[in-house]
Amino acid sequence: MIGRFRVVRQFLRRPLGLTSAVFLVLVIISVALAKLIAPYDPLAQDYSAVLATPNAAHPLGTDQLGRDVLSRLLYGGQVTLIGILEAVVVAVVVGIILGLIAGYLGGPLDTVLSRLTELVMAIPGIVVLLMTYALTGNNAHAGMFVLGVLSVPTIYRVTRGAAAAVRGETFISASRVVGIGRGAIMVRHVLPNVWGPIIVNTAVLAAVTLGIQGGLNYLALGVNPPAPSWGGMVSEAQSSLLQQPWLMVPSGLTIALTIVAFLLIADALRDATDTRSDIPSSAPRQAVVEDSTAPSAAPEGALLAVDRLRVAFNGVRVVQDVRFSVAPGETIGIVGESGSGKTVTASAILDSLDAGASVTGCVWFQGVDLLHAPAHHRRAARGSGIAYISQDPMVALDPSFTVAGQLGELVARHHGLRGAARQRRVLELLDQVGLPDPAGTARRYPHQLSGGMAQRVSIACALAGNPKVLIADEPTTALDVTIQGEILDLLRRLRDDTGMAIVIITHDLGVIADIADRVVVMYAGEVVEQAAVEAVFASPGHPYTRALLAANPIASERGKPLMAIPGTVPRPGSWPTGCHFAVRCPFATEACSAAPIRLEPVANSEDHESRCIRIDEVLRSSRKEVVS
Amino acid sequence: MIKTLGLRLLASLVLLIVVPTVTFFLQAVTPGNVAQSILGIGATPQSVAALDNQLGLDRPVWQRYLDWLAGFFHGDLGTSYITGDSVVRTLSGRLGVSLSLIVGALVVFTIVGVLLGILSTSSSRVWGRLIDVVSTAGIAIPNFWLGVLLIGVFAVQLNLLPATGYVQPSENVGGWIASLVLPVIALAFAGITGVAKQTRDQMLVSLASPYARSLRANGASEASLLFRHALRNASGPIITVIGLIFVGALSGSVVVENIFVLPGLGSQAVQSTAQRDLPVIQGIAVYFTIIVVVVNVVIDVVNTILNPKARAS
Ligand code: SF4
């Protein structure tokens, strides 16, 4: 439950919302006090002063019958504001009750109510309103009541959605166990949790209702001229448009400003109650690349090399001091629990970090630092230098296009092939990834493919540009165990056939054992160990790797996610100064927590690095275990 | 696929029965005497009773409802209380005017809304702000005020377009278009907001999706991601929203026709309301509902064609 006072405080902190609220209160007070403050009778005509522009006697001028515009505006506001109140109250009360019932109870009642509201939304409301006015002799209250009923779906939908969302939450289930009645639960527990979106939408509804009601009053519906109303005054202004255009301003602007006030209040409430949608607020923006202090040189012999990579999201570091390199044709496995920074590292290489990320360091590819290279260099590398396959093949293909449609696009882009040549290449690629019926598959849509087939198609898409490196982010996690093996076999065969290197990201030690030449172990945003796969499995050079292997004795068995080891990974933003693993490390000493630990070569091994100051003790005890 | 469409069509046709039923229901529950209000306060009880009898209002509502339904299925919508003319004849000449206005507005808010939505998808902050301003203005400047402002500026001040009135396309196509420009803008304005927002939101969802990430990483161009993939995937939800906005625009057309004095269904509706001419209002309800049903069906068909999953099933 959101603390009400916090919301009020939050709301008062938004200048636009606060200004709007003050404006609205002023409008309401002056309209309510029209009798006291209006300078004239709204119906009093003065033929000596028709169509006057604002002057001392008439602050907003006069209309074609010499009536005072300000007075008419004040009195006219009463019809308007009372009408909005009536319509909104009806919509909110009925909408909340039905929404709570449907959202909280669910079941057939929910279905019926939801269908009914859909029906109401499909009815052109104006005809029902006209009928009401015709039958009731132009009765304003009847019209607003019906308008309220027609607006019920708006409030119903948000209430239902919010109520359904909190239904499953633990405190609700707990109340149910305790034996509190359903009605009481809805009023006492569900309602306080859904009122955020409801009040936001009520403010929007008030704005919309004002517009509709103004239109009805313009048509002299729900108001009987010469009685004043805001909408009616626009109509009067229209009839003297030629003689006095000024008349359009006071009434129209009052309506517009009042609507804007409602909308801004809604906006401020949305911020204050934290009712945000999960739709991204802007397009994916480029991550910011910061200059690294000392540019390194392109490493010799490496196809792809990551050096001193550091990534922060909104100031919180999630990856730091990551370095590793990939030789042509080599397969590197990056292993770590979730939150270790392995996927962020891949995104940095692929230049697909989300907005709000800032990157330092270097990503060398074929002698060019992609991070600092001009945009066209990075574009050129995509697909034809570095390619990518993602975790869940079922969402990695565009659902609106056939396999040929999307694969063909990439083929055309990389090789400029068109027509039959393009189609031929598409079929070749599909054949290359081991799909039994390339022509048939090409015609299919993603939803017509199995997970394994979809992953093969994804791989074909990645191969379209003949890449030098393939980044595979958990390529088998979403698949059945049998299919996993097939996909790994395929990757191995493609590597051997095409000579491309593979960087495979996984939390599955079995996958590493199966396919990788070398392994990079990540923990809490850092590389903690890297070496040839056999070396790591035989004598792990870091207590974390050791713990992983100990917890997963049959490491060569694929399909098992990492077994948990005691303790939790420190979250980004709360990393310790010294070794990130210290709290969970059986070898930890005071020195470990004193200062950052560097990634250093393990004694007498060129290609083995570890981030541990007690590496000798660790290795000795590993050996002891092997011996015993 | 045919079956799904058929079911949807059936659901739409339900509307055709629902709307007249609702209006008859209103007759049953609202107090007040129609004959009395047609004749005015000074009418004698005798003349009220005579008119009641003449219009058939002395019979119970449910009986009138069944009679009306029987006629409805034969294409007869009754006769006007005021003129005694057949409702169908009164309205059929006006349908074209309303359709010109409404379809014109549909085209305008769709095109402008989608374009604005695409522009505001770009990462530039200026365009992002623009859509906020447009969406506020779309609600804050209601059609009746916008209509009068447009007349004030383009007809009265600049003398570019006619202030009011309608020209039949058979008489003069140029004049027809000129007579529709301002009304169409006034009616379309409110709809632009919704279309633009939906376009932007759905395209951003698509651009943030895993397939967009994969396509981009494997070399698809930004232009293709935006126009080929994101727009294509957003099109279904956009069209659905257009359907909802269209229903609102129908209501708006009643106001706009009156601003610009267009002889369509909407101006007839307001006149008949003032005259308590129930059969004509009822008839307009039917016409409007048919328009909604037709649009719903078109939307369903287009959505089915656009959505490979729906097409296959
Ligand atoms: S540095 Fe210390 S705490 Fe960290 S892994 Fe090595 S022994 Fe454990």
Image (tube, helix red, strand yellow):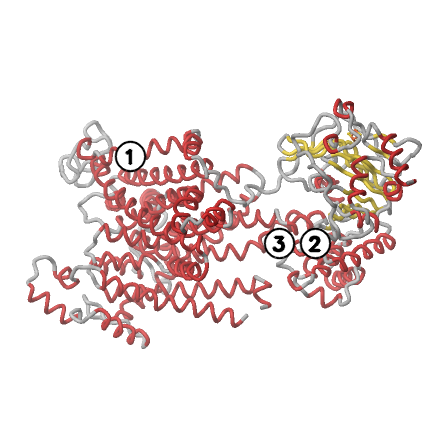
| Label 3 residue near ligand 1, CB within 8 Å | no
Ligand 1 sits in quadrant: top right
Q: Mark 2 points at which residue?
A: A478
Give residue A150's position: percent from left, percent from top. Answer: 34, 55
Point 90% across, 37% down: residue: A623
Nearer to the camera, A212 or A177: A177
Circle 3 residue: B228
Q: Position of residue A301 (x, y in %)?
A: 89, 38
Can you see residue A49?
A: yes
Give the class, few, some or many, for how many residues have Cα within 10 Å of label 2's Cα (few <14, many ≥20). Answer: some
Q: Is residue B189 something that shows in the picture?
A: no
State which quadrant residue A433 falls in. bottom right
Marks 1 and 2, the one that precedes in the sequence: 1
Chain ID at mark 1: A
Up-down: is A14 above or below A84?
A: above
**Is mark 1 in CB contact (under 8 Å) with mark 3?**
no
